[in-house]
Amino acid sequence: MSSQIVNNASENQAQCVVTPCPLCQMQLDIYQERYQDATDSKPRLPIIHLSQLVGLALGLDNEKLGLDLNIINATKLV
């Protein structure tokens, strides 16, 4: 299911996946390489938490939002 989430987002030209659940964000971000490789899927998207998206909308910088700490590079969203 995790692979389907990322693949569907990529197919619909999403730049990232946003989740309100911290555990979901962690699961999708940390293990994305593993489940995408297991399903022979190519897309890799940044997975960010809803609070990070709100921070981006408010103009906060990457460091304050922790985007540089995400496994899949999320700093390119700015």
Image (spheres, helix red, strand yellow):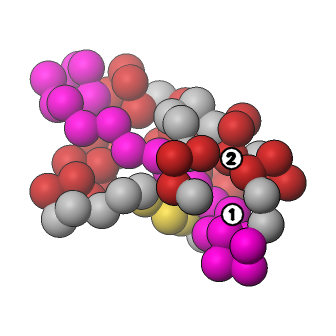
Q: Earlier in the sequence, mark 1 or mark 2?
A: 1
Circles 1, 2 touching at the beta carbon (< 8 Å): yes
- Asked whether residue 13 appears in the rendered view, the answer is yes
Q: Position of residue 18 (x, y in %)?
A: 50, 64
17 on left or right of 25: left
Q: Which residue is mark 2?
A: 67
Kindly identify the residue that appears in the image at 38 percent across and 44 percent down: 45
> Is 27 displayed left or right of 55 in the figure?
left
Quadrant holding the C terminus: bottom right
Residues drawn in magenta = 36-59
Circle 2 crowding by C-alpha within 10 Å: few under 14, some 14–19, many from 20: many
Asked if residue 27 can be seen in this view, the reply is no
Circle 2 sits in a helix, a strand or a loop, which is it? helix
Residue depicted at 60% across the width and 45% down the height:
75
In the rendered view, would you say 31 is above or below 43? above
**Residue that carries the numbered disc 1 in the rendered image:** 52
The answer to whether 39 appears left or right of 33 in the picture is left
Looking at numbered disc 2 in the image, what kind of residue is underneath it?
Answer: Leu
